[in-house]
Image: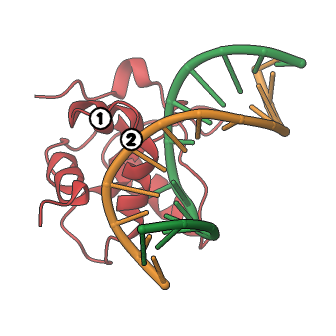
Chain colours: A red, B green, C orange
DNA sequence: GAGATGACGGGCT
DNA sequence: AAGCCCGCCATCT
């Protein structure tokens, strides 16, 4: 079936290393500007070891959204930093610099 | 098919 | 500037 989730995964796979996108941005690119929440819900079901670069999706404030388990956000940050993304003193990334504008 | 869920966002305090 | 509240939307139970 044509799940919205599948579309989310396909789009996120297109985000290049060293770049990030916001949940709302993903939703907008898929044609549903108000489905940001559903995007986050979709990523929640990703299995470990997936080929989807889920770490490149953050919230509109440039922060890594909290979740369970608590170590997950830490892993996400390490993955991003290993791609060259820099976090400031408030654990946020500068979206003006790292935001992926789409294809 | 109705109610609950949640890795969001924007606006107001 | 940081939090809180409330509306949104697709999926899950």
**Residue A57 rendering spot, x and y as whole percentages:** 37, 46
The part of the image, by quadrant, that contains residue A41 is bottom left
In the image, are marks 2 and 1 on the same chain? yes
Side of A65 where C9 appears, left or right: left
Q: Helix, strand, or loop for circle 2?
A: loop
**Is residue A62 shown above or below A49?**
above
**Where in the figure is residue A48, as x and y percent of width and height?**
32, 78
Residue density around tag 1, few if under 14, some if 14–19, many if 20 or more, within 10 Å: some
Q: How far apart are marks 2 and 1 (CA)?
A: 5 Å
The residue positioned 22% from the left and 44% from the top of the image is A17
Residue A96 figure quarter: top left
Crowding near the residue tagged with mark 2, few <14, some 14–19, many ≥20 C-alpha atoms within 10 Å: some
Q: In this view, does A32 lie to the left or right of A15?
A: right
Instruction: Return the x and y of residue C12 as percentages of the image width and height.
Output: 41, 76
- Residue A35 is tagged as 2
Label 2 resides on the chain identified as A
Please state, as top left, top right, bottom left or bottom right, where the C terminus of chain A lies in the image: top left
Left or right of A4 in this view: A35: right
| Whole-percent x, y for residue B8 in the image | 50, 42
Determine whether A39 is above or below A41 in the image.
above
Query: Which of the image's four quarters has the N terminus of chain A?
Result: bottom left
Pointers 2 and 1 in contact (C-beta within 8 Å): yes
> Does residue A70 appear in the picture of this structure?
no
Q: Residue A32 carries which label?
A: 1
The answer to which of A64 and A9 lies nearer the viewer is A9
Q: Which chain carries label 1?
A: A
Q: Please indicate, yes or no, whether residue A87 appears anywhere in the rendered image.
A: yes
């Amino acid at each position: 079936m044509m799940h919205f989730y599948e579309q989310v995964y396909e789009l996120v796979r297109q985000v290049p290393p060293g770049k990030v996108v916001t949940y709302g941005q993903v939703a907008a690119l898929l044609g549903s500007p108000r489905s940001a929440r559903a995007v986050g819900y979709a990523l929640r079901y990703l299995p470990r070891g997936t080929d989807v670069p889920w770490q490149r999706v953050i919230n509109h404030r440039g922060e890594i959204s909290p979740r369970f388990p608590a170590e997950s956000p830490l892993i996400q940050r390490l993955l991003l930093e290993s791609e060259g993304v820099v976090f400031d003193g408030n654990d946020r990334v500068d979206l003006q610099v790292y935001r992926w504008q789409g294809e």
